[in-house]
Image (cartoon, helix red, strand yellow):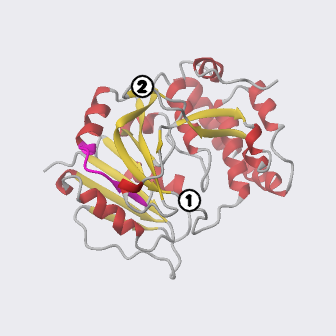
Amino acid sequence: MNKQISIIMPYLNESDMPNNTIESIYTTADSNKIKIIAIDDNSDDKNKTVLKDFPNVCSIKNDKRMGVDWCRQKGVELADTKEILVIDGHMVFRNDNWLEKMVLLISKEPKTIWCTTCLGLGYGANKIEEHKGKYYGADLRLLSDQEKDRPCRQILEPRWATEKSEKDYKIGCPLGANYFFNRDYFLNIHGLRGLRSWGSSEPFLGLKSYLAGGDCKITKEIEIGHFFRSEAPYVTGIKFLVYNKVFVLKTIFPKELEDKLMKYLPKDRNYNDAMQMIEADKALIEQEKQYYQSIFKCSVYDYCKRFNIEIPN
């Protein structure tokens, strides 16, 4: 039987959670229609995952940590189906015909980055029926006063969006690690190419989809549980968070808006380290910028107007 969807599942230091996630997938959908690309991002021996003998799972182990966004990009490149679902290694699926619905939505709108409803789990809520709330994609804030205690995240931050009445509707960007899309479209807009480690992937993906003439939407008809944790089982260096924001600004933002937002990044050691990496990647950044200019049909200003996003002075 031909596979209908490829599921990209990076994980790092998650012990048995990826096994639980795959079991949840295969108890709610036909495994014959699914291929799972499970990427272990170089877990340590204490928290490593030993995957069970599941059908249709391609298991990859990185020999050094590459970051979740690199893993997602690599997984999509390796996939051989038109339909792609990207998830984390700590998710719970419910029996709501999610596979058939995803395939249908992707076929109807192949230039849309789709996001499912996210059911908040963790903090005592371990079953999907006990979820702590429903989340419906994100709005993007160019500048966020709520992040003054974390100044490296004061710009380009997604925030959970307010629910609307429609079953499917446009959102600023995806959020919740439950994204599905047409593989060719993702690769055409260069997906998460160029990002390091983790950070800014949702704004990057949502922005590029709109600028390239596509869409980004939430569907309320598919609900996937996501275990949120008070502390990740790994450390992400702040320099990578800063690097990714600067990479996004330099590749897809107009120069005047890039300059306005850059001034909000704290000029500390992490900034200096990030800018050294940016300098080393100057050729890649210029190459990506030129490519985006060739495929984009509108500007970041058009995006901000569409979603009533305030542009800082």
Residue closest to the far bottom? 46
Q: Secondary structure at mark 1?
A: loop
Residue at x 41% of width, y 30% of height: 112
Residue at 24% across, 53% down: 34
Q: Is residue 288 above or below residue 127?
A: above
Does 245 sit above or below residue 93?
A: above
Residue at the extreme right:
267
Task: State which quarter of the image contains the C terminus.
Answer: top right
Front residue of this view, candidates 302 and 228:
228
Asked whether, in this view, residue 230 is left or right of residue 3, the answer is right
Region of the chain picked out in magenta, as a range: 90-99
Q: Which residue was labeled with disc 1?
A: 67
Specify few, some or many for label 1: CA neighbours under 10 Å numbering under 14, 14-19, or 20 or more.
Answer: many
- Horizontal side, residue 267 vs residue 30: left or right: right
Q: Is residue 50 magenta?
A: no
Count neighbours of disc 2 (C-alpha within 10 A) and say few if under 14, some if 14 to 19, many if 20 or more: few
Q: Secondary structure at mark 2?
A: loop
In the image, residue 93 lies in the stretch drawn in magenta: yes
Residue 266: % across, % down = 84, 47
Of residue 28 and residue 152, the one placed in the foreground of this image is 28
Residue at the spot 70% in from the left edge and 61% down from the top edge: 237
Marking on residue 165: 2
Which of the 4 image quadrants contains residue 64? bottom right
Q: Relative to 123, is 290 on the left or the right?
A: right
